[in-house]
Image (cartoon, rainbow, N blue to C red):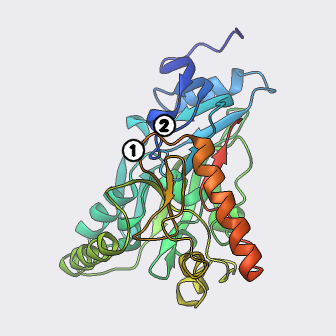
Amino acid sequence: MMNMPDVRGRLTPNRSLSDLTWLRVGGPADWLFQPADLDDLCNFLRNLPSDVAIFPMGVGSNLIVRDGGLRAVVVRLGRAFNAIELKGTGVTAGAAALDAHVAKKAADAGLDLTFLRTIPGSIGGAVRMNAGCYGSYIADVLREVQAVTRHGEVITLTSQELAFGYRQSRLPDGYVLTRATFDCPAGEPAALHARMVEQIAKRDATQPTKERSAGSTFRNPAGYSSTGQNDDVHDLKAWKVIDDAGLRGLRKGGAQMSEKHPNFLINTGGATATDLEGLGEEVRKKVYAQTGITLQWEIMRIGEN
């Protein structure tokens, strides 16, 4: 096996990723690296052979790892990267900080990041995918990010440099986001917390939050713009297209399109990654045949079959 750089964190060969994803499927990564701190991450990337692929992974909330696993080093940030700092109207959060925790801590200080409260996952993934809901997106509030390049250099990127689009950013391959700073609108703490309570109630009433899912399976088929702001007010939604095609509750092996919300792909128990991705592709094919609309995956799929 390849000689790897010395680390102070944890470097595990042939590590299964299934228990690190919300859908609980997938094969092993060649290596899983959990850096001790920023210096450990920089030194590792600086000394890693340039032909070895890197995949930064958050909490696996929006991810299918295929059954054959991943020929790469998966970098997963931990406690050294989850601090949340408040200064004036700014919130700086480590990439491993959970979106919900950032929203709540900001609200305590009268800063409005309430839209993050119901978004599963961590800040690194939220930035990478320009996460958003209720008409607000990361692109609306992000000031800058700190990242480590594939060569181990610490850099700062502005919101403009990330060139956000609908559910996407232009973060170069192999870069690892380590923290993000947001400029937040002000609000009354009690009102912000009350709004989040309402959002959670609405989410729980409409989404299969007690099932093994990875959030929305497909992007809404319309509403593309530089920030994605138009999406939440557009009439055409992925769930409606899937429902109208009669695919609510469709099954394949242990995978199912949720009866409660047909744009949620769930593992009912014992599903493989092949079941889940195969069901998603079947939905895309049937929706296209009936409507001419090509649904785009919102869940990231990585690795080998």
- Rendering coords of residue 248 (x, y %): 50, 71
- Rendering coords of residue 129 (x, y %): 60, 61
Q: Earlier in the sequence, mark 1 or mark 2?
A: 2
- Rendering coords of residue 255 (x, y %): 51, 51
Q: CA distance from mark 1 to mark 2?
A: 8 Å
Camera-nearest residue between 185 and 229: 229
Side of 211 where 68 appears, left or right = right
Query: Number of marks in the image?
Result: 2
262 up-or-down from 303: above or below:
below
Camera-nearest residue between 284 and 179: 284
Residue ID at (26%, 77%): 192
Q: Quadrant of residue 116?
A: bottom left
Which class describes the residues within 10 Å of circle 1: few (<14), some (14-19), or many (20+)? many
Side of 230 where 286 appears, left or right = right
210 up-or-down from 49: above or below:
below
Kindly identify which residue carries mark 2: 77
67 up-or-down from 123: above or below:
above
- Rendering coords of residue 183 (x, y %): 46, 71
Give yes or no for contact between labels 1 and 2 (Cβ–Cβ under 8 Å): yes
203 up-or-down from 232: above or below:
above
Amino acid of disc 2: Leu
Q: Secondary structure at mark 2?
A: loop
Q: Residue furthest left?
A: 190
Residue ID at (30%, 69%): 204
Kindly identify which residue carries mark 1: 82
